Amino acid sequence: GGSRGLRIAEQLNLQNRLELCFLKLEWVPRSQSAQDELLEYTDEEVLEKFQPNETLEHFVLVNYTGYVFPTWMMNKLTSLPYLVNLCLFHLHNCSALPPIGHLRNLRYLHIKDMPNLRDLEMGLSGGPVSLGKLTHLKLEALNLEELSILLSANNESPCFMFPNLEELSVLSCSKLVFKPSLPKCAKYVIKESNMVLSCGQPLGPLSSPSIEKVEISGCTIPSGWLQWLRSVQTLEEVV
C-alpha cells in the first residue's frame, strides 16, 4: 500500500499490458514506522491503480487490507470479460464480494479466509446465467451461514446458480448450509463443515455430471447421508 505501491502501479501501467494473462497482487505486513510513513494513500487507492487489461484470465488477490474493492472490480466486472480463474485470500476487512456472477467465463473460484463476509449471494448472482461456466468452487475458512443454489425457485423449471459445476470443496466452514440443498457435481471435498452435511441430497439440472467421488473429513456423517451414498450407483470412491 501507500505511495510506494502507487508508484509501482503507475510504472507498470497494467491497463495497457495486452499480453498480461496472470496477475497476483499481495499485500505484505508493514512495520509501524512504515505504516506511519506510507499513510499518504489508502490501500483502496492503490488497488484502484492496478487495473489490468481486459485480456486478464487469472487473478489472485491476497492480504488486501482495504474495506472495499476498486471500481474496476465493482462495475459488474465488465472490465474483465475473459477472466477464468479468481482467487480471493485473507481479505479480513471486506464484508461483501464484487459482482462475481457477471464473470461470464469464470471457471474456477476460490474464496478463503474472509471472516467478515456474511453474504455470498449478492456477489454470485448475475442474472439467469449466473456463473454458467463455473466448474470448480472452493469455499474455505468462512463464517457464512447460508447459500442458495437457486436463482429461480420455479418448481417446474428451477434455475440453478452453478449448472455446470464439476467439483465443490467446502473446508472449515462450520456454519454454512446450502439451500435448498447442495449443488450437484461429480466430486465433493467436505472438511470440518458439519452443517453442509445437514443439507439434503444434491440438486442440479438434468445436465449435471454423475457423482463420482466424495471426500469427507472432520465431520459427523448423518445416517441419511450414509444411506444416500450407498444408493449412488455412479459413485466410485468415498474417502
Image (cartoon, grey):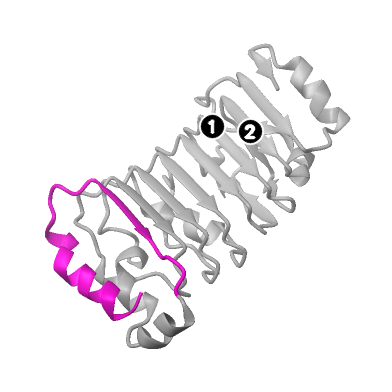
Which residue type does callout 1 highlight?
Answer: Glu
Question: Do the residues under discs 1 and 2 have CB atoms within 8 angstroms?
Answer: yes
Instruction: State the image quarter where residue 157 is shown.
Output: top right
State the mark number for residue 167. 1
Instruction: State the image quarter where residue 73 is shown.
Output: bottom left
Quadrant position of the N terminus in the picture: bottom left
How far across and down, in percent of the image, does residue 164 sit?
47, 32
Q: Does residue 205 appear in this view?
A: yes
Look at the image and say whether residue 8 sits in the magenta stretch. yes
From which residue to which does the magenta span run?
1-30
State the mark number for residue 189. 2
Name the residue nearer the viewer: 51 or 38.
38
State the mark number for residue 54. none
Q: Which residue is at 58% across, 57% downward?
A: 113
Which residue type does callout 2 highlight?
Answer: Val
How far across and down, in percent of the image, does residue 9 sit?
22, 68
Look at the image and say whether residue 157 sits in the magenta stretch. no
How far across and down, in percent of the image, does residue 228 sit?
77, 23
Total label count?
A: 2
Mark 1 or mark 2, earlier in chain: 1
Q: Which residue is at 83% across, 22% downward?
A: 227
- The CA span between labels 1 and 2 is 8 Å
Is 230 left, or right, of 93 in this rendering?
right
Secondary structure beneath disc 2?
A: strand
Q: Specify few, some or many for label 1: CA neighbours under 10 Å numbering under 14, 14-19, or 20 or more.
A: many
Q: Which residue is at 48% across, 75% downward?
A: 67
Instruction: State the image quarter where residue 79 is shown.
Output: bottom left
